[in-house]
Image (cartoon, rainbow, N blue to C red):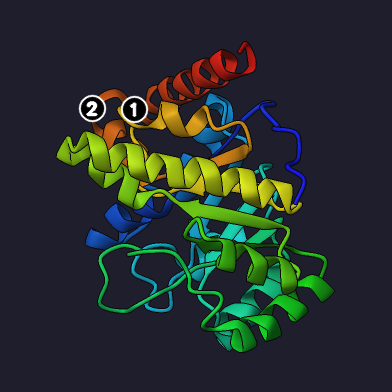
Amino acid sequence: MTKAVSYAGPLRLGVNIDHVATIRNARGGGHPDPILAAQIAANAGADGITAHLREDRRHIADGDIDRLMSDEIHLPLNLEMAATEEMLEIALRHKPHAVCIVPENREEVTTEGGLDAAAHHNKLAYYADKIAAANIRLSLFIEPSSVQFAVAKSMGAQVVELHTGAYCEAVIEGDEKKVADHLKRLQDGAAEAHAMGLEVHAGHGLTYNCVKPIAAIPEVMELNIGHFLIGEAIFIGLDEAIRKMRILMDEARKSESGK
């Protein structure tokens, strides 16, 4: 296979607002408002909003999706969802900019890994066909794997989002070998997916301390970041937290483009 030319263009930032809703739901009522967080994100330089409507509605609620698709917010919505009939109906009714199918287990605290698209090809193909027929961009949240890329491509996904969780955990542990190994997997995977004609995104667990090597991967076109930004907002405000992340991303991309 001929390797495609590296992208290395502007890098988009999608801000995940799930955990603003988590704080709201801890006490009930309407505060803090996830839609206000989306508006702040837009003003701080975000390029899109990501929201995961879970089956158990532990954070984002149906009403939040209604508002994110209204005139209250003018950024494109990346709707993360499990492959279920209920979620498909919601996606087809709202028609967000993109749908990202993610693995979902009721007992997990957060998404624990990438979707095994190969093992669940027949089930996922059904949802992929319905989403494509509605002219919604389809993304699969997967591990950097040749098999997963091939399956994503075969079912018509335009985007793959690479799971960066293992890399981020290695950074926290301070294991330099594991960091290097996981980073190389992501770099090689991004190049391979890009060469296949897939748009490459990345996310999960990214922080100020580990974002720059991922942002520097030339084929990655978008990062989706949420939990860390909402946590930082407690100390420095959401606007400042997003702007600081945006600066680090842009510095890494500028450095890569200048090579």
The residue carrying mark 1 is 208
Of the 4 image quadrants, the one containing the C terminus is top right
Q: Quadrant of residue 156?
A: bottom right
Q: Is residue 222 left or right of residue 205?
A: right
- Residue 160: percent from the left, percent from the top? 61, 56
Nearer to me, 248 or 20: 248
Q: Is residue 62 above or below residue 203?
A: below
Identity of the residue drawn at 68% across and 82% down = 125
The x and y percentages for residue 128 are 70, 76
Foreground of the two, 13 or 60: 13
Q: Is residue 132 above or below residue 245?
A: below
Disc 1 residue type?
Tyr
Residue at horizontal 76 percent and vertical 52 percent from the top: 197
According to the picture, the residue beneath numbered tag 2 turns out to be 235
Which quadrant of the figure has residue 98? bottom right
Alpha carbon separation for disc pair 1 and 2: 14 Å
Identify whether 138 is placed above or below 46: below
Q: Secondary structure at mark 2?
A: helix
